[in-house]
Amino acid sequence: MCSLRDERKLITRRSFIFISIKAVLGTVIGARLFYLQVLQFSHYKLLSDKNRLVAKRILPPRGKILAANGELIASNRFTYSAVLDLLEIPEEDRINVISQIIKEKTLDDKSITELRNIPETINRNNRLILLQENLDWDDLAGYYITASLLPGIVIEKVQMRKYLHAEELSHIIGYIGAPTKKDIEITDNAALTLPMAKIGKTGIEKCYDEELFGKIGVQHVEVNARRQFVRCVSDTESIPGTDIHLTINLDLQLEVYNILSNHNGASCVVMDVHSGAILAFVSYPGYDINIFTKRIDPKTLQEVYNNPFKPAINKVINGLYSPGSVFKIITGLAGLAAGVINGDTKFRCTGVHELGSHKFHCWRWKYNGHGSVNLRQAIAESCDVFFYNVAELVGADKIAKTASDFGLGIQTGIDLPGEKSGLIPTKEWKKTMKKQRWTTGDTLNLSIGQGFVLSTPLQLVRMISIMVNGLNPITPYLRKSKELTSLDRLQYKQNHIELILDGMYDVVNSATGTARKSAIDDEAFEMSGKTGSSQVYRITEAQRNLGKTVSDEYWLKEHAIFIGYAPDSDPKFGIVVLVEHGGSGAKSAAPIARDVFLAANRLC
């Protein structure tokens, strides 16, 4: 039997062991807490914040686009989009959540494809999938209900582009759209990974996209365990895009578009001959660029691209046409500059110019030609044979050099993307590209703007503007604040230029001019110009023997062209009008030019 003293010793020993164990455990726990809460504080705070805080990138309001007088032509409106955040869905639930969304919601093919092909690794750049945009109230309510039941669905308030006068301004403004993988790869703009992000695809929207886009903002939001919004912790505001002010006179633009609407396909540019500022820029037909502000229905897109009159093509800078008879002023100037002709030089036109066994016809071949004409008369009456003779004397190289001096075959540098260069053919070009030698026949075709030569309507209006503004090269531009490029004045004699302009005055204002029926009956605002017909189909000798001069089929008719300026006494406006398959420039294009000039004089 243990004594009381022995029992006390046993209790004391047990207490010591228990207390020691507690002390050791306390020390271990304390050390662990010190390690976690002090030494590893930053690490675990970061992990906690990742669970508690969500960083949302905020798209900036896109800059507006305005016409010359400040009228809005591209603005923004608020709308709502439904987005699926894949990182907010537990990995084991993703397939089920995605299946329910596809089953319950009316989604387009692109959204369904993205949902069915989610990447194996989800990260910051691919976590978001756009389910539906531009939600109406019924759709919005439906998504809010679904979001309360399924994880990952987020409703975003976004800005959508709104285009005013969308068809009339379609080829100037362009449109925005979702960035492609290539767009994302070539830029460091993190906002482009957002499914709601839009960038400029064509027109001014693309040319000035970086300025219009603005700077992205970031909002840090605290959420609870169910990932529901609790409060905004910090906010770095986005910076709105820059507004772009254009040189376009909106009233004139709308009136020109309305005038061209009487034809199937046409283009017209009105430009300040001294500065290069574009006052009206119309490629007809246009198309509703508002269809591109959201995911576009493939059927609607096909209707645009399959239209035979090509509304999606900007005919002003992408349309390549043989300039036809308007090129004769270049051939005439080349002859004057080379000294092979002067104002008194005459050639006899019998309607045909023979080159070996081949016949080059004048457009008046049925009427035995124009008779004996000088340069001024040849321009006024558009005599082909006169310029055939000049071309044989001056040669193709000097004609091509003169054309290049006035900007033909060269991009104008207008602030729009995708401009084409056109072509001024040379002997070296034909040898390299066609593997053929240059012939005198090529020179004759070049002299009247046919054969291989191609130009855009914008190049033609720049050409005539340089000719009447004192030979000062100009760059056409659409943005008001665009910095202008100053180039050296062209070195041509002013008396030679005056001879060309005298002929252009007679085109419209003389009794024998090709566009005499389009003259403006106002001495203070007379217009001058040059008509042209650009062949798309060659009349055969057999057809000529039957008296046929043009094709009866619409698609084989010539393009009608007119270039000009007004007022003649003090040029202010330069113009080009091109009516696709319009036939005679005098009958189709010149009357349009007259009406547009009168509108410009009234509105500008």
Image: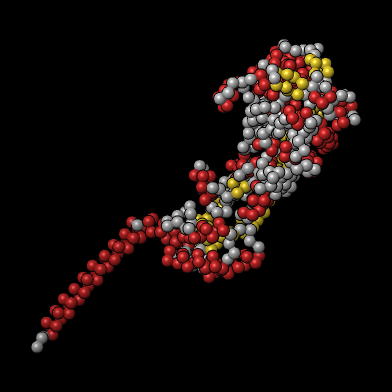
Q: Residue at x 70, y 21 (%)?
A: 358
Of 581 and 58, nearer the camera is 581
Q: Can residue 468 be seen in this snapshot?
A: no
Of 68 and 386, nearer the camera is 386
Q: Position of residue 46 (x, y in %)?
A: 41, 57
The quadrant in which residue 486 appears is top right
Q: Residue at x 62, y 37 (%)?
A: 418
Q: Is residue 224 left or right of residue 202?
A: left
Q: Position of residue 320 (x, y in %)?
A: 67, 34
Residue 270 position (above or below residue 511): below
The quadrant in which residue 45 appears is bottom left
Q: Residue at x 69, y 17 (%)?
A: 356
Residue 11 position (above or below residue 116): below
Q: Is residue 195 left or right of residue 4?
A: right
Q: Quadrant of the N terminus?
A: bottom left
Residue 460 position (above or below residue 234): above
Q: Residue at x 57, y 46 (%)?
A: 215
Q: Position of residue 294 (x, y in %)?
A: 63, 54
